[in-house]
Image: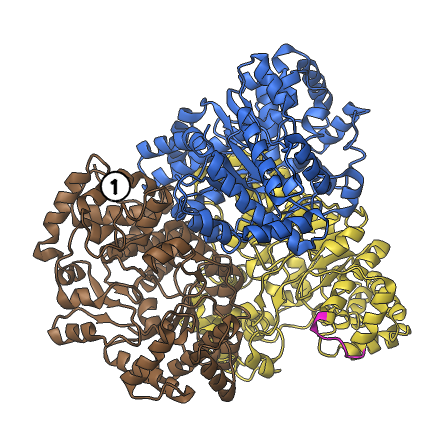
Chain colours: A brown, B blue, C yellow
Amino acid sequence: MTLLNEDRLFPAEVGTRAIARRLYAGIRALPIISPHGHTQAEGFARNQPFPDPVALFVQPDHYVFRMLYSQGITLEALEIGNKRIANPRKVWKIFAGHYHLFRGTPTRLWLDFAFQELFGFTERLSAATADHYYDVIEAKLVTAEFLPRALYERFGIEVLATTDSPLDSLAHHAAIRDSGWKGRIVPTFRPDGVVDPAFDGFAGGVRALGEMTREDTTTWGGYLKALAARRQFFKTLGATATDHGHPTAQTADLSEAEAGRLFAKVTAGKADKELQELFRAQMLTEMARMSLEDGLVMQIHPGSVRNHNAQVFARYGRDMGADIPRPTGYVEALRPLLNRFGNEPGLTLILFTLDETVYSRELAPLAGHYPCLRLGPPWWFNDSPEGMRRFREQATETAGFYNTVGFNDDTRAFLSIPARHDVARRMDAGFLARLVAEHRIDEYEAVELAQELTVGLVKRAYKL
Amino acid sequence: MTLLNEDRLFPAEVGTRAIARRLYAGIRALPIISPHGHTQAEGFARNQPFPDPVALFVQPDHYVFRMLYSQGITLEALEIGNKRIANPRKVWKIFAGHYHLFRGTPTRLWLDFAFQELFGFTERLSAATADHYYDVIEAKLVTAEFLPRALYERFGIEVLATTDSPLDSLAHHAAIRDSGWKGRIVPTFRPDGVVDPAFDGFAGGVRALGEMTREDTTTWGGYLKALAARRQFFKTLGATATDHGHPTAQTADLSEAEAGRLFAKVTAGKADKELQELFRAQMLTEMARMSLEDGLVMQIHPGSVRNHNAQVFARYGRDMGADIPRPTGYVEALRPLLNRFGNEPGLTLILFTLDETVYSRELAPLAGHYPCLRLGPPWWFNDSPEGMRRFREQATETAGFYNTVGFNDDTRAFLSIPARHDVARRMDAGFLARLVAEHRIDEYEAVELAQELTVGLVKRAYKL
Amino acid sequence: MTLLNEDRLFPAEVGTRAIARRLYAGIRALPIISPHGHTQAEGFARNQPFPDPVALFVQPDHYVFRMLYSQGITLEALEIGNKRIANPRKVWKIFAGHYHLFRGTPTRLWLDFAFQELFGFTERLSAATADHYYDVIEAKLVTAEFLPRALYERFGIEVLATTDSPLDSLAHHAAIRDSGWKGRIVPTFRPDGVVDPAFDGFAGGVRALGEMTREDTTTWGGYLKALAARRQFFKTLGATATDHGHPTAQTADLSEAEAGRLFAKVTAGKADKELQELFRAQMLTEMARMSLEDGLVMQIHPGSVRNHNAQVFARYGRDMGADIPRPTGYVEALRPLLNRFGNEPGLTLILFTLDETVYSRELAPLAGHYPCLRLGPPWWFNDSPEGMRRFREQATETAGFYNTVGFNDDTRAFLSIPARHDVARRMDAGFLARLVAEHRIDEYEAVELAQELTVGLVKRAYKL
């Protein structure tokens, strides 16, 4: 018995499956390019063992605990938020006893991949196998081959991007560089905390930014210089991209004077919600301008209503599985930025969405026209087999394949990285196989496209 | 020749179809649990024969006559709205002569099921077979085996919920209970007419509610007590759920004082559209509060623009096939209610939608987090093979199967109940079969899930 | 080697494919009915050779050059906007060298069809084959069999509608009629330029309309009379339909006095955006009224944000591939018109959308009820294999097949017409084949439906 079938995720139709197998065989072993994610550089800097199965599989993974929570298991019982887990085996047993809840979800695919490929399990996780799983995982975690750097190499990762605040010293990135280890861990410049006035600690962040860069961030000009300086610094540690997690995709193109006045209001804490949105909007355009100057690729991840559950937020803080997508428009929202920079050949702007209705209606038409635009892969809840299929079906005919950028694992769960890339490679192989089986492209073209989607487009889009 | 193939609705791919057949075989004969619908208790109380083929198949079924109307057949010609049908055979012939219009629709599947399984027809309905159909149906309807209770038993129904106004005496439900018949027909508390100020007769309804319960419904407190009392009464006749058919999913959480003032305005007829919406919104939260107290499961069916066709409404009244869905948001709309009660383990709130764009964007993320939320099955226009497939494909990966509640037939067409459940079972078998064929779940898991989707989840969600 | 496989676009599953082949065989050779498109009557009037491969395949086709532009090729390099192409072979080589960008797009299917079926190519276009392609095409274009009328006949076109301004003299249409050629090229009345105050040259257009019809278009009554007169004139040259390309689907039903006052404001240039929208809305209802009088079928194509790219618009003008869809609502927008004319059996109103979310939520429910409404085929970006499949899957179950109107090629690329109809026929054959394979309809019904979708419904809907 195995947890994973060799043909998983391929279309069932025999002819199409045979093509998918061939296409997948050509990309299965390609290196992992991970240009966007949320693992921590610290892990690779320190290279210490992962503490225990719960700290590895349950605690950092909001996909896992949100599902358990939705079925009545308290976050308390899962020890979410505890710095140190008091009774990891007890939490593990709760998780194991509810593993059936994940049937049909990508989480199940990711976990089974790690369980089988890394730990060698052949029986499915359940209440009955919980202790066995726990014991085996616990024992392996302390071995040398399960240290972060060893896993990085075993996973065949070629480059892994983290996501970092401009206020981060990037000391861990520097430590990795200085360690002589050949792994390539690069930071990504994610300035939300110092460009979004609605962020907790925004004012303090802007001040800290000034101190860090010795720029006068009480002025609009100084603030922009400080951001540019931190972008430069990120580049010295390998950064090739920025990332922007705004509530909407709204952009603005104010005059310098208007922007300066807005900045003054915003930093004085006198901006209402509308002005805060306008400031975020203006900052996207400023970031695009800086990207044109320093060459950093720009990513926008808009459309999440953060911390929807007030009680959970009050008690546990951010990123507790209670972020919910909202309808997100791009056509009018991006217009100010695109009218200014949309035709610049030197700009790359990668768009993401949680609102699938925009794939065919907005994103593919936009990316199929503007030279600067590229489409990011299905994001978050849509980073799933069906979500990937819908993206390809809805975006490809108008944007083509070449305006997309391959896969992002976008994860804080390091052990799930190979599983996630494997799902993407299989789904792409299956989608391309269908195009071949329906004689919409030739197989030699599908072979080329599979390579592009796995490596070529990723490297070119992210300048890696 | 038959009207229905044994393999209907299963995926064509042979391997997948074989799995679907096995899964379906395990659930085909399970009892029908019908926790939400619009049949009338009176029929089971009186247990009288159905009058004629038109009164059975055409007149009560807005799916049928809206399609005929859309193709230029007048409602007059169909005798819609006539208390007694003057020339049922003539109407039947119009229907039969246009039966081709239903090709590709679920109505055709439901009708053919009844035609074959109940009446034994083997040739498709058409102008040529119209009289034969009419004669056979007419003759059977007067036999004992076609009385409502006999059909209930023959259909293998275990429980059937009706939908009833708080002002309904539930005399027919009581009569059924007192009759000693073992059928389980339970009411559902649907208070729209007395909580929605936009409803015709709202003020009179609130007054009547006071008289019925001997509470002073001119006060906010008395009004709430009266509603609670009627909920209690519904429970004595077997009710386990409430249902709310609002234009939107908007909820509110006003202070008692604010709510009281709003109630005064609303009952005085002084509320504009915005305040009417606010009152409905507040009432959803009040209903959730009462559900926590009395244990009734809460259902919200939002997003229908009622009576879109002014001429048809003026002449024929409500429910004439002219209700049209509108875009419906849940994320901000439900926030006030969820912020108050979303984490209560004792509450069950089942959400429905006519706007499929929210499956992956809003409903699955919400239900995959909040303990109180469950997703109702595809509703109304989406209660169809493709609609069911889209629901499973778009909701499962984020909400899982266990945050769904199985199938609702939601029908006023009693004879279509087994057909509708059969379609749902076949589509679920087909969807699960695909997951098995693509090695996303094991077949033993699919067997368990098929049982859950057919019976287990329904009974647990609706406390039946 | 061939560019096109005989089984292209059919489902891969063998049983379904066999059915699709049979269905397609029955419709493959049916005449092309093209009731809506953007070819020019002048071409058929003059019947001159097409100038060169670039003028034929690149310059007029915004699908082609928008994709090239999105990948960094300048419009300058493609000589877009040049009256006479200075170096067509150079442009052709750029196009050929980037032909891989079209993998997975409908453009690729359309082009390969023309390349193989008209020009006999067997090797795919690429940098390597660019010159060969150029030479062969160039040589064939000057032959008699490549003249517009010869191609019209070779394509098996039975009728071809153009789209024309009310200010157009229709001289070319008259010339065709007077030439004795048996081809049927009919105009379509598209009054956007004289009913949409936001149109460049609106005021002058209204004046010109008055001069043309000798009506006083400074008054509301005279303006309406002038429009009615031009509709009549269009009818004398074979027009059976009007078309309306508005930003939204908004309609209005003002009193005559209100409408008159609005007209005065609008023509005086004193209407803000909101009043301009109201005027367009009113004009749709006026057009519906005139359609009831003169029998012209009405089409609405709403929801495109025109000229999204300000720089491209400033330099190259309209229709440069920079039109982007926006979310488009129909339920409330159409209400004023439908409340007035929705139940008129004499009116046909064909609805299109660029917002696929409305197929199941709004358009199918509306068309499945209102006698005047029919659903146009997938439009523009959605006129693609996946787009067609989504339309059938999302609209059919509620609207049925008989509330749809078959296919529109909607193209200005004359040579792509047979390719586009072939894609539609294949996709319909495949969709119907699936319904047969899943035993949702019988094969004899699918045969009838395939004929209807290809010819019957088109002719009846457009009165051709």
Q: For the point 69% across and 30% down, which residue is it?
A: B60
Q: How many marks?
A: 1
Q: Nearer the viewer, residue A458 or C305?
A: C305
Q: Amino acid at mark 1?
A: Ile
A295 in relation to C9, above or below = below
Q: Position of residue A370 (x, y in %)?
A: 49, 74
The location of residue A272, given as percent across then percent down, is 51, 73
Q: Is residue A107 left or right of residue B313?
A: left
Q: Which quarter of the figure has residue B13? A: top left
Magenta stretch secondary structure, dominant? loop
Residue C229 position, x and y percent, is 87, 66
Q: Is residue B443 left or right of residue C29?
A: left
Position of residue B171 relative to residue C178, above or below, is above
Q: Nearer the viewer, residue C264 or A458?
A: C264
Q: What residue is disc 1 on?
A: A94
Disc 1 on helix, strand or loop?
helix
Q: Is residue A77 visible?
A: yes
| In the image, farthest residue toward the top | B144
Q: Is residue C358 above or below residue A289?
A: above
What quarter of the picture does the N terminus of chain C occupy? bottom left
Q: Residues within 10 Å of mark 1 (few under 14, many from 20)?
A: some
Question: Pointer 1 indicates a residue of which chain?
Answer: A
The image quadrant of residue B346 is: top left
The answer to whether residue C425 is seen in the rendering is no
Task: Based on the picture, tell me whether residue C220 belongs to the magenta stretch.
Answer: no
The residue at 32%/56% (across/down) is: A316
Q: Residue at x 65, y 54 (%)?
A: B275
In the displayed structure image, the side of residue B20 where residue C52 appears, left or right: right
Figure check: A123 above or below A410: above
Q: Which residues are magenta?
A: C268-274
Residue at 37% from the left image edge and 60% from the top image edge: A445
In reply to whether residue C270 is colored magenta, the answer given is: yes
